[in-house]
Amino acid sequence: MASPRRRYGPAARVLFTLLDLLYRRSRTLSKFKVLEVVARVPYQAWENVAYVAVTHRYSRPTFARRIFERVHESWEQQDNEQWHLLILEELVEASGKRESFLRYRVVPQALAFAYYQLSWLLYALNPRWSYGLNADFEDHAEHEYALFVHETPELENRPYDGLFVDEYGHYESVADLFRQIGHDERVHKQESLDRMDEPRFI
């Protein structure tokens, strides 16, 4: 919480404003679930771009191998975001909250589709722009999770023994679980920042 937020770019600010308008500014499990639906798609877009690049650069094996390594990294990041989504879905279900099908199923998928297209286009034009947008998104998520734990102290006394402890990890409390998710977002942010000066694949 002590770290400053990034100076978000125009696309990120529009996205965060839209999420606040659709789901209010308050931090809820349902809103975090929407964030995680959207969070996976840049990694899917980069994986798609990388596969296209491999088909054009396979005659340069060393370069093609580096591209394929990026594909594997994207898989790992997607999987991590997928665990976040599954855990949040589980927690929402356990809370007994009834969610609107339109607001929490249809709209998030539409947002994810648009975000995928934007991530792909920005990468094709200039990878730095796509990585920067993802760093903005992950930075936002990291801070939102930290604030959620701070605003909900009762999570410290709530044990986490959900369906995915064997895959994602065992945590003494739901607060610790969310701290780990926030830390994952920080790692993803840093990975995007580290890639910003890499040469483009296409």
Image: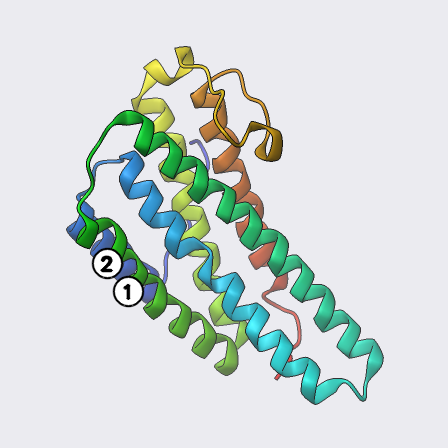
Residue assigned mark 2: 107
Residue type (three-letter) at the residue carrying disc 1: Ala
Question: Mark 2 falls on what kind of element?
Answer: helix
Q: In the image, is residue 54 above or below residue 139? A: below
Instruction: Identify which residue is drawn at 39% across, 33% down.
Output: 90
Above or below residue 185? Residue 114 is below
Give coordinates of residue 153: x percent, y percent.
34, 16
Q: Quick check: 94 left or right of 6?
A: left
Q: Nearer the viewer, residue 91 or 58?
A: 91
Mark 1 in CB contact with mark 2 (< 8 angstroms): yes
Q: Residues within 10 Å of mark 2 (few under 14, many from 20)?
A: some
Residue 94 place in picture, x, y as percent: 33, 26
- Identify which residue is drawn at 33% across, 14% down: 154
Name the amino acid, label 2: Val
Left or right side of 27 for 125: right
| Residue 110, numbered label | 1
How far is disc 1 from disc 2 in space, using C-alphas? 5 Å
- Residue closest to the eye, 4 or 119: 119
Residue at image point 83% right, 80% down: 61
Picture coordinates of residue 176 (x, y %)? 49, 23
Left-right relation of 169 to 158: right
